[in-house]
Each structure stands twice: as C-alpha cells, then as structure tokens.
Amino acid sequence: MTYSHKVLDHYENPRNVGAFDKDDETVGTGMVGAPACGDVMKLQIKVNKEGMIEDARFKTYGCGSAIASSSLVTEWVKGKTLDEALAIKNSEIAEELALPPVKIHCSILAEDAIKAAVADYRQRNTDTENT
Ligand code: FES
Ligand code: FES
C-alpha cells in the first residue's frame, strides 16, 4: 500500500518519541493494543499545575500509520486541557493523515491511547486536579 505524505513525514521524523517516568505524579500513561493486528502504543502526557498538557511522549510498536497517528496526537495534545484532549477523535487523525479504510484502526489506537493516558493521570491525581 502507499502511505500519504503526512504519514511518511511523521514516520520518518516522528515527534516526541520517548518516555517520561511513569511514577512522576504529573504524568499520565496510556498503553493500548490493537486486536486487529497486535500493534502496541504507549502514550504519555505531562500535565502542569493549571491542568494543561505541557508535553507528551510516545512509543509505538506498529505500522507506519500507527506511528504517524501517535506522533500527530502528541503534537495535538500539547497546550490542551485534559477534556480538550479527550475530545480528539480518531476520525480527525485519520482525516489529517489521509488514512485509507484498512488503517483506520491505527488512528483509533491513538485516540484510545490518549483516553487511557488521561484516565491514568486522573486516577492518580483525584485529590489534586482542579485545585
Ligand atoms: Fe503490521 Fe500493524 S499490522 S504493523
Ligand atoms: Fe495495526 Fe496500524 S496496522 S495499528
């Protein structure tokens, strides 16, 4: 199959690859797998005192579209609140990257990874958020 230019760009120059210390209380970690293909995506957010995502990292063991989707969302979540990050839809990712139908699940993986990261952050910061 052929990849779109944007997929190739993110694949060859992925943004924000790496990891934060998952025990850092300002960090939320989401780890999700795609049943369709077995690919795995780890996405982390770093949240500042105002409840804004100030940084993000990812590691993806998967196809080019999954890597591009995770790279893209680490850019998108920066500067967003947790609720704004939760509003990111896989359809927006798929549209931005011009993913073909067989690669839609790769963008779903990225949406799920954000949701898991936010849920992890919230679970570990139930006392401090919004204070
Ligand atoms: Fe081969 Fe996802 S199916 S990397
Ligand atoms: Fe499965 Fe891309 S082919 S995540």
Image (cartoon, grey):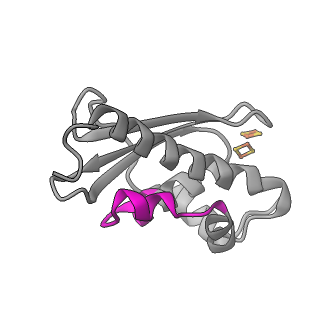
Q: Say which quadrant the N terminus sits in.
A: bottom right
The answer to whether residue 5 is above or below residue 37 is below
Q: Identify the residue shown where x is 70% and y is 69%.
A: 4
Would you say residue 78 sits in the magenta stretch?
yes
Name the one closer to the observer, 121 or 66. 121
**29 versus 64 height, above or below:** above
Q: In the displayed structure, does residue 71 sit left or right of residue 127?
A: right
Q: What is the x, y in percent for residue 63?
A: 68, 45
Q: Is residue 50 visible?
A: yes
Determine the quadrant in which ligand 1 lies. top right
Residue 89: x and y, percent? 61, 63
Q: From the viewer's side, name the closer residue of 63 and 110.
A: 110
**Residue at image point 58% right, 56% down:** 69
The answer to which image quadrant residue 41 occupies is top right
**On the picture, is 106 further left or further right than 74?**
right
> Looking at the image, which residue is at 24% across and 56% down?
51
Q: Position of residue 45 (x, y in %)?
A: 34, 47
Asked if the stretch drawn in magenta spans residue 113, the answer is no
Q: Is residue 102 left or right of residue 112?
A: right
Span highlighted in magenta in the image: 74-90
